[in-house]
Amino acid sequence: MFKRVLIANRGEIALRILRACKMLGLETVGVYSKADSDAFHLKHVDEKVCVGPASGSDSYLNIENIIEAGRITGADAVHPGYGFLAENQDFASACLENDLAFIGPSPETLKLMGNKAEAREAMQRQGVPILPGLTSSDLNESSALKLADELGFPILIKASLGGGGKGMRVVKDRHELVRALPLVKAEARHSFGSEEIYLEKFLEQARHIEFQILADKHGNIIHLGERECSIQRRNQKLLEEAPSPAVDDHLRKRMGETAVKGASSTGYETVGTMEFLLDGEDNFYFMEFNARIQVEHPVTEMVTGIDLVVEQIKTAMGLPLELNQNDIRIEGHAIECRINAEAHSRDFMPSPGDIVRWVPPAGPHVRIDSHCYHGYHISPNYDSLLAKLIVHGRNRTEALRIMEQALREFEVEGVVNLIPFHLRLLANPDFIAGDYNTGWLEQHLAALT
């Protein structure tokens, strides 16, 4: 059993982890960079340690400093949150080598799932559907052109170690493919330290559907239904909802069973997400497995009533799941809007600065996950997420109405933000009808901005 958890992250997820720890009666240690000394969660941790300057690479990505922070504060576990070191196998190994439990998958699982090409092959061996493609070991200009001729364009080039929507490029003809191969390799090497890439057929009218997995160290594994994540710009999610407007009970059962089968084959034993592409004929294909808590996990919590971060910590302690698949009920509908400090009318340019007015919405069925407050400085050093606004309704129509009112009540001044963008999105007839896919937002961006 844990006594003290070090939170190796910042922003809203650090506060979310702190609340889960307090729910379990655990002490907490907060780490921070010199730019984050006024972070809200630091007011509530039992101990705090500065781990470096403003640059993320020198602080939140500094494995040595974070491990030392855990050692000097007497922590016995580390929660990495999402981003930064959450899927870093070296960090997970360093924690275990220093007698710190890593609240996440094993280093071996992180290594497998961190390589998208290897994960893809592992899922294929288990009978999980994948899109036809070509992995890096067989990839060169000649083999890439041969594959493209067989499958037809467009083709998606992906960095094997990519993540967060980065390291991806769609090509539409032979000339683009030849020109893009060395460029994507260079981007992958610069961003992820490896130029390993792979190719697969690109689905133009697909939906991004992900299934929440919950597993323990005793071989128990279940899913908590799906999330619809197709409202994306440049592969970055802006709005998520659960359940998906495109998934009925029969399809949910098929996809859920496949997600559990794929995760079970890796020996997975914590919270994770199996991501699929879904075409218009209910065919689905493995995309990737995220071995961590997701940004959008609150929509699943709202429709299931299950605290995913609490469950994640409990399974890391070695406790067995108290739930089985038959216990899971999807009640109503939840929607999450990511409120970023970005100017949507200026190509979503980040908008750092000081928050001079902060009045979040309230009322029944409204949840705010945020680290912001009046006077807080939004630093240009980190991501631009101000808050996640989540609502729950008895059905999708009711959830949309609650979300619209919540957005209108949400007052933020000092930094440009995406509240006006989300209001326009919610008023769009296609979105209201649930008729959209991963390419829809880019096609309608002019009208929405």
Image: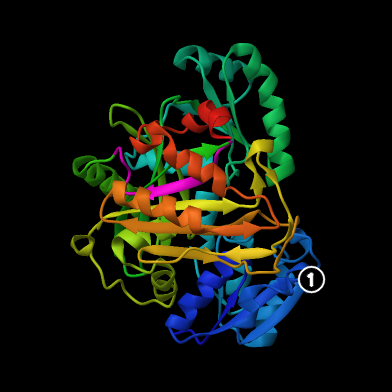
At 50% from the left and 39% from the top, the residue drawn is 424
Instruction: Kindly indicate the quadrant of the structure image that contains residue 128.
Output: top left
Q: Nearer the viewer, residue 389 or 307?
A: 389
Percent across and percent down for residue 1 are 44, 85
Q: Residues within 10 Å of mark 1 (few under 14, many from 20)?
A: few
Instruction: Kindly indicate the quadrant of the structure image that contains residue 10.
Output: bottom right
Q: Is residue 200 above or below residue 230?
A: above
Q: Is residue 247 above or below residue 198?
A: below
Percent across and percent down for residue 5 are 55, 80
Look at the image and tell me whether residue 49 can be seen.
yes
Q: How many marks?
A: 1
Q: Which residue matches tag 1? A: 34
Q: Nearer the viewer, residue 385 or 163?
A: 385
**Under tag 1, what secondary structure?**
helix
Look at the image and tell me whether residue 109 can be seen.
no
Does residue 239 show up magenta in the picture?
yes
Does residue 373 show up magenta in the picture?
no
At 77% from the left and 67% from the top, the residue drawn is 35
Percent across and percent down for residue 365 are 36, 63
Q: Is residue 120 above or below residue 61?
A: above
Residue type, label 1:
Lys
Percent across and percent down for residue 221 are 30, 61
Q: Is residue 180 above or below residue 363?
A: above
Q: Nearer the viewer, residue 430 or 300?
A: 430
Magenta span of residues: 234-246
Q: Quadrant of the C terminus?
A: top right
